[in-house]
Image (cartoon, helix red, strand yellow):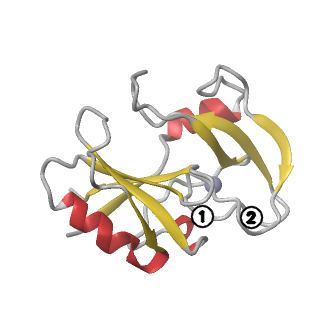
Amino acid sequence: MRLHYEPMDSDMVRALRAGGPDANGQPPERGAISTGQGEPCRHCLGQVPDGAEFLILAHRPFPALQPYAECGPIFLCAEDCAPWHGEGVPPILKMSPDYLLKGYTDDHRIFYGTGRIVPQDEVSVYAATLLDDPRVAFVDVRSARNNCFQVRIRRAE
Ligand SMILES: [Zn+2]
């Protein structure tokens, strides 16, 4: 199965960079400077370049408020970056030894039994296994340590 690693919506990212409200209704924090590791951007799905500014903001990757719509902190490049469109596994999923994966139904609720922490090199295999079940609409990848949302994985069209 081919997988699609979905970057954050470019229009939303543009609005946040312009100071628009995050999921908590606040402007993104500015002034943080990348150390060159451990600050993944949810738009280009790579590391914020060493020495470059990044935004810190609250993100809720769900269309509406409901009990399963988790909200938490993420980073974005403060400067323009291109949305991820590469083949294969994006760099954001090569920064930690393991990740928390969960399958969701098409009404944006956790599909119980799918949640698992998997080693970095097994993320794509486990995501494909979950997406092989038509009841799983997408897979969300989060930090296994801090629970921060990393990226959503869908079946490639
Ligand atoms: Zn970026």
Q: Which residue lies furthest to the front in this view?
A: 113
Q: Is residue 126 toward the left or the right of residue 132 in the image?
A: right
39 left or right of 53 in image:
left
Residue at 84% x, 48% y is: 32
The quadrant in which residue 65 appears is top left
Q: Does the residue labelled 1 lie within 8 Å of ligand 1?
A: yes
State the residue position of label 2.
Answer: 49
The kind of residue on which mark 1 rests is Gly
Q: Where does the image place residue 5, in percent across and percent down from the top left?
A: 39, 58
Under tag 2, what secondary structure? loop
The structure residue drawn at horizontal position 39% and vertical position 27%, both measured from the top left corner, is 63
Is 147 situated above or below 66? below
Q: Which residue is disc 1 drawn over? A: 46
In 3D space, how far apart are the residues under numbered discs 1 and 2 (Cα atoms)?
Answer: 9 Å
Instruction: Pinpoint residue 37: horizontal percent, then vertical percent.
Output: 74, 69
Q: Which of 91 and 87 is in front in this view?
A: 91
Q: In the drawing, does residue 68 fall left or right of residue 146?
A: left
Quadrant housing the C terminus:
bottom left
Residue 25 location, quadrant:
top right
Residue 156 vertical position relative to residue 138 in the rendered view, above or below: below
Residue 153, by quadrant, is: bottom left
Name the element at disc 1: loop
Of 33 and 13, the residue lying toward us: 33
- The x and y percentages for residue 84 are 48, 59
Q: Which of 141 and 117 is in front in this view?
A: 117
In the rendered structure, which amino acid carries the disc numbered 2? Pro
Outermost residue to the left:
134
Q: Position of residue 73 (x, y in %)?
A: 65, 41
